Image (cartoon, rainbow, N blue to C red):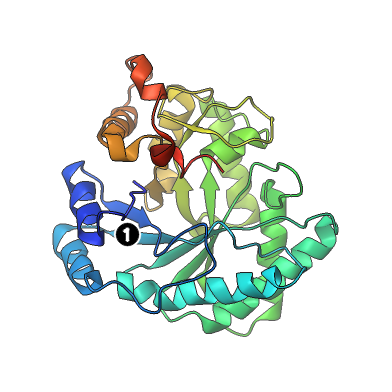
Amino acid sequence: MHLGVAGGLLRAARRSRQIGARALQIFSDNPTAWRRRPEAPLEAPAFVDYGASQGLETIAIHASYLINLAGIFEPFASQSRAGLIVEVQRAPLYGASVVNTHIGSHRGVGAEVGLERIISNVRAVLAEAPAGVKLVLENSSGGGDLLGSRIEELALILSGVEAGVDAGADRLGFCLDTAHLWGAGYDISSMSGVVEVVDRFESLLGLDRLALVHLNDSRSLLGSRTDRHEHIGAGKIGPVGLGALLRDQRLAKTTFIMETPGADEGWDAVNMRRAWMLWGGAVELTVLPPKAFRTTRRSTLLVRR
């Protein structure tokens, strides 16, 4: 699960184990501000020790929402590069082996220019990333000028990065967010649709590059290029497609993270149970009560972006 850390890092780690999660994604700082705290919280060492002792197999940091690797306009372009470098360099203090970031928008200058900018920025970040930390680029739903909605674009980025660095390209990975795939027009509501997407990613990038799957249902229409996350099996994608993805043996070593609504209201445990049921073979899930879809703005800040 992606869990908030407003109540402290240790609280998030303990909650993740309470609900049966073996992976945890957090923000290392305010995701909607450029300003970064000068150092990690005092409880960070205890958080790392707890995760190691309690079987948290993966800790991932989600970078700030403000980062735009495709942008060329200052000061935001420089702030994006510098901000992501801070995230990867600070990751070991949280025991994190993954830093996940949105790719960004070309903001009207064109996809070709934007992709060139992404490749340049990724090279720069990898050059500053410590050993053992993987930089992971997340696919987008494709709204506006967002890049990275097509698997082919992700492959272009990988190819460009590999061609331009002497070392570090092996630490570049990718994240497929299911709600973003759906918004971008990939019909993953069926087993055949899931197999087609995984096949395509395997063919163009290789599944060793798939570091994360963000497992989310969607409130959006297929191909709407919008991004509105929903509880597992309660959205437009549905249980069949999400279950097929969970059970695909090619992804047995891929970390799955849920960014579902109402995590701070107890729905984290509900979604975790629903995911385990799908992994176990369920093709139908119980209908959630109306209150599940009336979570507070605070609880859905993560998923309304």
Where in the figure is residue 8, as x and y percent of width and height?
25, 59
> Which residue is located at x 36 percent, y 23 percent?
292
Crowding around mark 1 (Cα neighbors within 10 Å: few <14, some 14 to 19, many 20+) is: some
Where in the figure is residue 10, as x and y percent of width and height?
20, 59
From the viewer's perspective, tell me whether residue 88 is left or right of residue 252: right
Can I make out residue 100 in this image?
A: yes
Residue 281, above or below 89: above
> Which residue is located at x 58 percent, y 50 percent?
202
Q: Which quadrant of the figure has residue 137?
A: bottom right
Q: Read off the residue under disc 1.
A: 58
Where in the figure is residue 114, as x and y percent of width and height?
77, 62
From the viewer's perspective, tell me whether residue 299 is left or right of residue 205: left
- Find numbered disc 1 in the image and state the secondary structure of the residue it sits on: strand
| Count of all numbered marks drawn on residues in the image | 1
Screen quadrant of the C terminus = top right
Looking at the image, which is closer to me, 148 or 262? 262
Which amino acid type is marked by label 1? Thr
Looking at the image, which is closer to me, 198 or 226? 226
From the viewer's perspective, tell me whether residue 129 is left or right of residue 262: right
From the viewer's perspective, tell me whether residue 125 is left or right of residue 145: left
Can I make out residue 132 in this image?
A: no
Where in the figure is residue 28, as x and y percent of width and height?
39, 64
